[in-house]
Image: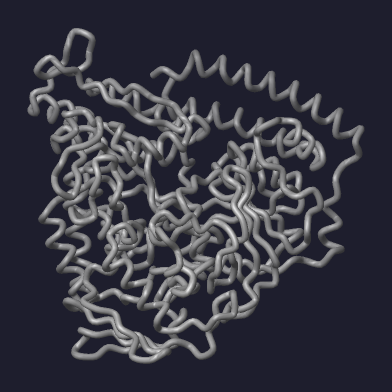
Amino acid sequence: MSVSHRRHRHRIASLAIAALLIAVPAGAAHATDLSAAGQQAPAESTPSPTTFRIATSGFVDSFNPFVSIYLTPTNIIRYVYEYLVQNDAEDGSPTKGLADSWDTEDGGATWVFTLQDDLKWSDGEPITADDVVYTYTQMMEVPELAVANGNLVTNFESVEARDEKTVAITLKGPQASNPGLEIPVVPKHIWEAVENPAEFANDKDVVGSGPYLLESYEANQRITLKANPNFWRGKPEVDRIQYVYYTNSDAQVQALRSGEVDLVTGLSPTQYEALEGAKGITVHSGEGRRYHSFSINVGLITRDGVPYGTGHEALKDREVRQALRLGTDTEKLLENVLDGLGVQATSFIPASFSKWTLPADDPVIMGYDPEAAKQKLEDAGWTVGADGVREKDGKKLELRLLVDAEDLQEQSIAEYFVPWMEEIGVKINVESTDSDTISTKAVQGDYDIYFSGWSVNPDPDYQLGINLCSTLPTGTDGSGGTSQDGYCNPEFDALYEQQRAELDETKRQQIVHDMLALNYTDTAQIATWYANSLEAYRSDRFTGFTLQPKEGGIIANQAGYWGYSTLKPVDDASAADAGGAPVGLIVVGIVIVVLIIGVVVFMLLRRRRIADVE
């Protein structure tokens, strides 16, 4: 039986389970969640019509904008701190943030930004040019504060305040991207009083300038934001946003059905389809700005060239890494794991940014070719041993793949990847663990392969910049830098300088394509797909989401603060229609559904044991 046939059988069973979960009365799902101790942090007992709740399982490293790099906290930071220049909701192009206008002097060597009138921090203090200068200067002068966005200021010669409303950034050389983008501006009067800014958690009662303020953080429980009355676009109509933690995506879906949360993102195709047509819920599919990949340990080194981590020696060889690429069928992964709800990837710049992404017909693109993969490994000296695993100099080609135990998508990919690698003579040992452990191991270089992905901004400069030798870590524990995959190639670095200085957009596009082609050939990662962003929300409670971009865009995880800042609660009458079910029906419903699910799961597992081998 082919894998594609098995996928449909697995899919039918998965849909049946999802449909049964969806069919549980709202109160029943709520009762099930509350009885499962430790499965999630319960939201407040009396839902407020002006509190918007988002289900999450996101890892939080910090809410410090100088050092945080993970998806959940960096998205929250976008809502807390305004940038000098914001990414427009319609198409991601530069638009006013703190700056009302900007111009260039000396042939583009100096950018001059004029701040808006009467800007205030949330504590009432005025926002001035000194706040901008302080923020940028800290990143330029203190390496520990350049972890998150330091590569964005490497071309800055100086930043000065000409007066309270005017900031002048003098560059070392011409720069295509607007230097006011993507850097959260912090209040000088708060941060200069912090004894150790690099270690500052910044996780409660935060003073900010964006539409929402971080009010409190309870690790693995909840994150609470409150509306900022001093936001220059006006105070949001929804008073609070609360991120509520759940240990897995199925619990998040049940919480949406029960009314415990109002938005779930990152849905699987099965969950998305099962929620279509559910009462009080609207599903949304948008073109995502995130790529997904296998990140390969290429032989990690610090900025000074000191090796660190536990990566397999074989992965230092580009030919071996290319063999892994040739042996991985990303087209089948897109179709079978993601149900085709996305685009097959070529590089780490998503297809949603059509100007910058590596074209699918670029000559460097390698299709799935296990025979070519075998030949590459043979040529690299890795010959097949008696057990079918390749070896060289007495060492086997045996690699570790880190997989999130709670992520069904990662587990599904692994089920395909392991036999594909076995076919070309590579043994994969799957190490299933929790996401926090994977994050720690990734930073320390304690892996051979793990699943990665970044949300990419409309201008590619930042993402290109975290693939430079100069952004590698400074410490052998992986600290002191932000590197996408531990990649370092001086030729790539030279091209980076060219693209940053190229003011002709057409010429710059070609340089960026050349950079992506080089990175693709070096194979520091195997990009799999650019997934559609699958979201669902309680449309009986909230309306007014702003998509980014306007056409085919997304609600959550934007390159801006548009998604939630324009939210409005629906009227009370509409919200009341979503009342819970009677207690007797809840109990009976739970018993029946649990029994049916048990039978379906048993049959599914039995089938998988028989049919999941090619």
Q: Does residue 261 appear to the left or right of 521 in the view shown?
A: right
Q: Does residue 100 appear to the left or right of 244 in the view shown?
A: left
Q: Quadrant of the N terminus?
A: top left
Relative to 234, say whether 340 is above or below. above
In front of the other: 224 or 187: 187
Q: Quadrant of residue 418?
A: top left
Q: How many marks?
A: 0
Q: Does residue 276 appear to the left or right of 550 in the view shown?
A: right
Relative to 213, say whether 607 is above or below. above
In front of the other: 343 or 71: 71
Relative to 570, say whether 6 is above or below. above
Residue 191, image x and y in percent?
45, 68
Q: Residue at x 56, y 64 (%)?
A: 206
Which colour style is shown?
one colour
Q: Quadrant of the C terminus?
A: top left
In front of the other: 309 or 485: 309
Residue 14, image x and y in percent?
60, 31
**Residue 287 visible to the viewer:** no
Residue 607, image x and y in percent?
54, 17
Q: Residue at x 38, y 28 (%)?
A: 416
Residue 93, image x and y in percent?
40, 75
In front of the other: 366 or 49: 49
**Residue 101 visible to the viewer:** yes
Q: Quadrant of residue 564?
A: bottom right
Q: Residue at x 24, y 78 (%)?
A: 158
Relative to 144, say whether 390 is above or below. above
Q: Residue at x 19, y 8 (%)?
A: 386
Q: Quadrant of residue 428?
A: top left
